[in-house]
Amino acid sequence: MRVTLHVWRQNGPDDKGQIVRYPLDDVSEHMSFLEMLDVLNETLIESGDEPVAFDHDCREGICGACSLMINGVAHGPQAGTTACQLHMRSFKDGDEIYIEPWRAKAFPVIKDLVVDRSAFDRIISAGGYVSVNTGSAQDANLVPIGKDDADEAFDYATCIGCGACVASCKNASAMLFVGAKFSHLEKLPQGQVEADRRATAMVEQMDIEGFGNCTNQYECQAVCPKEIKVDAIARLNRAFSRSTVKNG
């Protein structure tokens, strides 16, 4: 199959950047989207041009590094799928494909399709952890946890921090990410002790990083590759409200 790629090229955060057109022939429908970009880069290198910078690591839908906006949709047209799990059979011969980085003030472009997502790391450092002593792994496992709570905690814990929720939100809000990272701890007994403090610390850091406010558009839920629900945001909001009332 033949496709025409329109790829965002930008040398750094201070560069204006632009869309560059790349026709690509002989694309196999069995290629993953990132393998197709590998082929593009091989072609560019052979012709003496600079390859397109894009982020990737596991290529198994686990790490969340493959942060691409494909035809205006985070991670592309297939629901519950990361860009590295997307295959070219999702496209047709002759398709025009636009590929851009995440667009958010808190995610400055490093180069081309690569953005700096370290703001997420700082939010986790602010409160996304359990600091109270819960004993060794064996001791912690002695605490009875209902199956429904355990299952829900695991669902929230599947968040890979890719940033698709931010990129899809008109306000560049990180509430789904923060809500998921808060909720998977709050659902377990070990994480409930610091729940209110955790909510306040993570939300305050989120605001410092420059993420926008949530206005309940649900775009974050629609594009999340792990299909995390906005219930996580409601849980975070309740804890933040409790903390605000307690601390005046």
Image: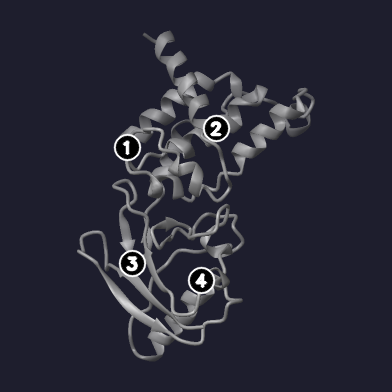
Amino acid type shown at disc 3: Asp
Amino acid type shown at disc 2: Tyr
Name the spot of residue 200 as percent of width and height, x first: 42, 23
Real-space Cα separation, disc 3 to disc 1, in angstroms: 23 Å
Q: Tell me if mark 2 has few (under 14), some (14-19) or many (20+) residues whose alpha carbon lies within 10 angstroms of its own.
A: some
State the residue at coordinates (44%, 45%).
Answer: 165
On the picture, is 178 further left or further right than 13?
A: right
Name the spot of residue 99 as percent of width and height, x first: 38, 66
What secondary structure is marked by label 3? loop
State the residue at coordinates (42%, 27%).
Answer: 201
Name the spot of residue 42 as percent of width and height, x first: 45, 84
| Residue that numbered label 3 is attached to | 112
Residue 212 numbered tag: 1
Amino acid type shown at disc 1: Gly
Looking at marks 4 and 3 on the same chain, the residue that comes earlier in the sequence is marked by 4
Real-space Cα separation, disc 1 to disc 2, in angstroms: 23 Å
Looking at marks 1 and 2 on the same chain, the residue that comes earlier in the sequence is marked by 2
Real-space Cα separation, disc 3 to disc 2, in angstroms: 33 Å
Find residue 90 and report its image quarter. Answer: bottom right
Q: Tell me if mark 4 has few (under 14), some (14-19) or many (20+) residues whose alpha carbon lies within 10 angstroms of its own.
A: some
Looking at the picture, tell me which residue is in the foreground, 156 or 97: 97
Q: Identify the image's colour scheme: rainbow, by chain, secondary structure or one colour.
A: one colour
| Residue that numbered label 4 is attached to | 91
Q: Which mark is in front, 3 or 2?
A: 3
Tags 3 and 2 touching, CB below 8 Å: no
What secondary structure is marked by label 4? loop
